[in-house]
Amino acid sequence: MKLEDELKQKSFKNPYHRMMVNVMFTGNWLMKELSCQLKPLGLSSQQNNVLGILRGQYPNPATLGLIQERMMDRDSNATRLVDKLLEKGLVTRCQCSHNRRQVDIVITEKGLELLKETDKIIQGLEDRFKQIAPEEATLIGELMDKLREREA
């Protein structure tokens, strides 16, 4: 459905304004879809992001700083998210052996198993985009990267 129909708005002041609103609207739509599907598993999208980061590090530990710099939502409180995952038995946390001020975080087997379920959810969302050719998906990704470039 066209953005104008979704928002019941006839026009935008220029193509850049329409693009900006469309990117925000579509991002919010996608995050809501993901959040609704993760909720029955007891996960937020931010918690799922942390687990994915930890799976990428596995079996090596990660620090809170590493998690924070790799998160999609960098305004999230990584400490609070790790605490929630620790309560659920999805991660372990221990003091680093060579730096007592550093905390090492590792995903557990339970966390890895849960990610197998969330991978199915992500695949289901990806499958909803089959109307977009792989080349178009690549172009959209490249254009999104270009949007985040800063002026020289």
Image: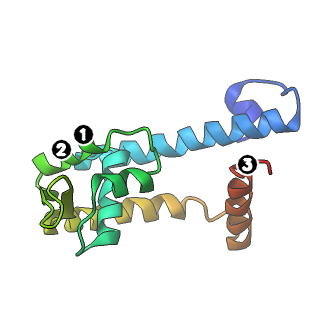
Q: Are the residues at dot 2 and dot 1 in contact (C-beta closer than 8 Å)? A: yes
Q: Label 1 amino acid?
A: Arg
From the viewer's side, name the closer residue of 147 and 15. Answer: 147
| Number of numbered labels in the structure image | 3
Question: Is residue 113 shown left or right of residue 15?
Answer: left
Mark 2 = which residue? 83
Neighbor class of circle 2 (other Cα within 10 Å; few <14, some 14-19, many 20+) is some
Residue drawn at 14 percent across, 50 percent down: 86
Q: Position of residue 61 (x, y in %)?
A: 23, 67
Which type of secondary structure does the marked residue at label 3 adopt?
loop
Which type of secondary structure does the marked residue at label 1 adopt?
helix
How far apart, in angstroms, are the residues tagged by discs 3 and 2?
A: 35 Å
How far apart, in angstroms, are the residues tagged by discs 1 and 3?
A: 31 Å
Front tag of 3 and 2: 3
Q: Position of residue 141 (x, y in %)?
A: 67, 61
Question: Is residue 52 shown left or right of residue 59?
Answer: right
From the viewer's side, name the closer residue of 135 and 78. Answer: 78
Question: Is residue 33 shown left or right of residue 60?
Answer: right
Q: Position of residue 71 (x, y in %)?
A: 42, 52
Please tell me which of labels 3 and 2 falls first in the chain.
Answer: 2
Quadrant into which the N terminus falls: top right
Mark 1 = which residue? 80
Residue drawn at 21 percent across, 67 percent down: 113
How far apart, in angstroms, are the residues tagged by discs 2 and 1?
A: 5 Å
Colour scheme? rainbow
Neighbor class of circle 1 (other Cα within 10 Å; few <14, some 14-19, many 20+) is few
Q: Position of residue 40 (x, y in %)?
A: 25, 46
Q: Label 3 amino acid?
A: Arg
For residue 97, above or below residue 152 = below
Mark 3 = which residue? 150
